[in-house]
């Protein structure tokens, strides 16, 4: 029996609207994906693995990391980002930091690698930025970076709270650009790939719940398409401790492996939340994930997200198919542990 024969037209329309979509949310970029990485580095270790992945993509000519902005208001977060960038041979990537932001604590996974020194007193992981308070304001760096790019060139990956991007939307014209923030974003950003929320329904998620007003603002007002990697995606893709123990040993001291070993007692398999947002941002057309139809994403008073299908609304969430899990996890492991360029730029 062909059930569809018995569906009335409105029901049929609803079925079509809710069917997963395989086409990317935006056309893939020509050339390397021009990335800004906005991270709450230090609250969990997946941010560090995600940054390592971005460097692998840059080494492969698939991405260009324009800037990193930190949404965790911590003295060691920006220095840790700077030392990872330096470790991969790219010490001049600008790093900005939130002012008066959320989670103002230093955690061992960012503090210890930032402070550790050799017997002769040098940093084990060299870096110039030694205090997050000395980093430029994240919103100013976002405005400068976007202003310098061509139209619709930039993909932003947000894997922490929405504090910086909400402030960017509200920013006024300045010496970086005559455009107010929302117009600057509308002109320069092609896609926002975020790790946030829980879809289609779930519990309040940390990145949203930590700064609910900013999440609401970005999810409602952001002018470009947004693709969400919800809690359930990374939760279903556990990054194996064996990868940390074996695949990062091409160098005696690896800052990301050290952060992983410091974050929790080894061995443990941490969810790959932030890594999935990077993977989609750089390879949206490789069939790793299916996409939900378009809709609106709203946030309740506890930080729980809700999705309401609506054609043209410009927000979608990733859908993980069971038969893609092993393939995605292998890609995440290979990219995150990829040795740095032998001839760094
Ligand atoms: Ca994060």
Image: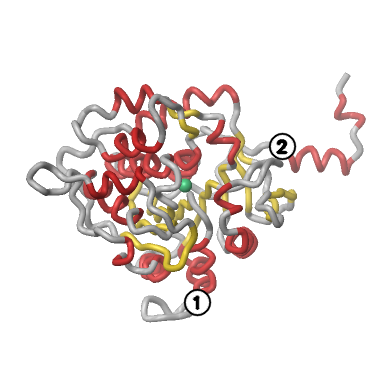
Q: Nearer the viewer, residue 223 or 121?
A: 121
For disc 1, the marked residue is: 180
Q: Residue furthest left?
A: 120
CB at disc 2 and ligand 1 closer than 8 Å: no
* Image quarter (top left, top right, bottom left or bottom right) of the N terminus: top right
Depth-wise, is mark 2 or mark 1 nearer the camera?
1
Quarter where residue 14 is shown = top right
Q: Which of marks 1 and 2 precedes in the sequence?
A: 2
How dense is the environment of label 1, judged by Cα within 10 Å: few (below 14), some, or many (20 and up)? some
The structure's colour scheme is secondary structure
Instruction: Report the disc number at residue 311.
Output: none
Q: Position of residue 184 (x, y in %)?
A: 48, 70
Answer yes or no: is residue 15 visible.
yes
Q: Position of residue 271 (x, y in %)?
A: 50, 33
Tell me the residue at 52%/55% (across/down).
Answer: 161
Above or below, comparing residue 90 to residue 4 in the picture: below
Quarter where residue 131 is shown = bottom left
Q: Position of residue 127 (x, y in %)?
A: 21, 53
Secondary structure at numbered mark 2: loop
Answer yes or no: is residue 71 visible.
no
Instruction: Report the disc number at residue 19.
Output: 2
Tell me the residue at 42%/60% (across/down).
Answer: 73
Tell me the residue at 62%/63% (across/down).
Answer: 213
Quarter where residue 261 is shown = top left
Above or below, comparing residue 186 to residue 7 in the picture: below
Above or below, comparing residue 224 to residue 334 in the picture: below
How dense is the environment of label 2, judged by Cα within 10 Å: few (below 14), some, or many (20 and up)? few
């Amino acid at each position: 029996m062909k059930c569809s024969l018995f569906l009335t037209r409105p029901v049929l329309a609803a079925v079509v609207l809710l069917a997963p979509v395989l086409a990317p949310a935006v056309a893939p970029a020509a050339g390397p994906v021009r990335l800004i990485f906005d991270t709450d580095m230090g609250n969990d270790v997946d941010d560090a693995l995600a940054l390592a992945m971005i460097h692998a993509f840059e080494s492969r000519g698939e991405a260009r990391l324009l800037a990193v902005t930190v949404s965790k208001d911590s003295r060691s977060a920006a220095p840790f980002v700077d030392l990872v960038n330096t470790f991969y041979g790219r010490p001049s990537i600008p790093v900005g930091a939130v002012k008066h932001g959320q989670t103002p604590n230093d955690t061992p996974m960012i503090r210890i690698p930032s402070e550790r020194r050799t017997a002769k007193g040098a940093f084990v992981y060299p870096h110039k930025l030694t205090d997050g308070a000395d980093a430029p304001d994240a919103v100013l760096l976002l405005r400068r970076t976007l202003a310098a790019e061509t139209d619709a060139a930039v993909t932003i990956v947000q894997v922490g709270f929405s504090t910086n991007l909400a402030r960017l939307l509200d920013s006024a014209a300045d010496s970086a650009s005559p455009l107010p923030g929302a117009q600057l974003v509308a002109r320069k950003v092609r896609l926002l790939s975020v790790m946030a929320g829980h879809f289609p329904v779930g519990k309040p998620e940390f990145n949203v719940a930590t700064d609910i007003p900013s999440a609401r603002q970005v999810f409602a007002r952001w002018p470009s398409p947004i693709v969400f990697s919800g809690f359930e995606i990374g939760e279903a893709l556990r990054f194996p401790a064996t990868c940390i123990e074996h695949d990062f040993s091409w160098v005696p001291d690896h800052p990301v492996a050290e952060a992983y070993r410091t974050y929790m007692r080894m061995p443990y398999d941490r969810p790959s939340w932030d890594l999935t947002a990077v993977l989609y941002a750089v390879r949206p057309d490789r069939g790793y994930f299916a996409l939900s139809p378009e809709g609106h994403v709203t946030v309740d008073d506890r930080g729980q997200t809700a999705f309401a299908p609506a054609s043209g609304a410009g927000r979608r969430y990733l859908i993980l198919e069971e038969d893609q899990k092993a393939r995605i996890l292998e890609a995440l492991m290979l990219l995150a542990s990829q040795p740095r360029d032998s001839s760094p730029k």
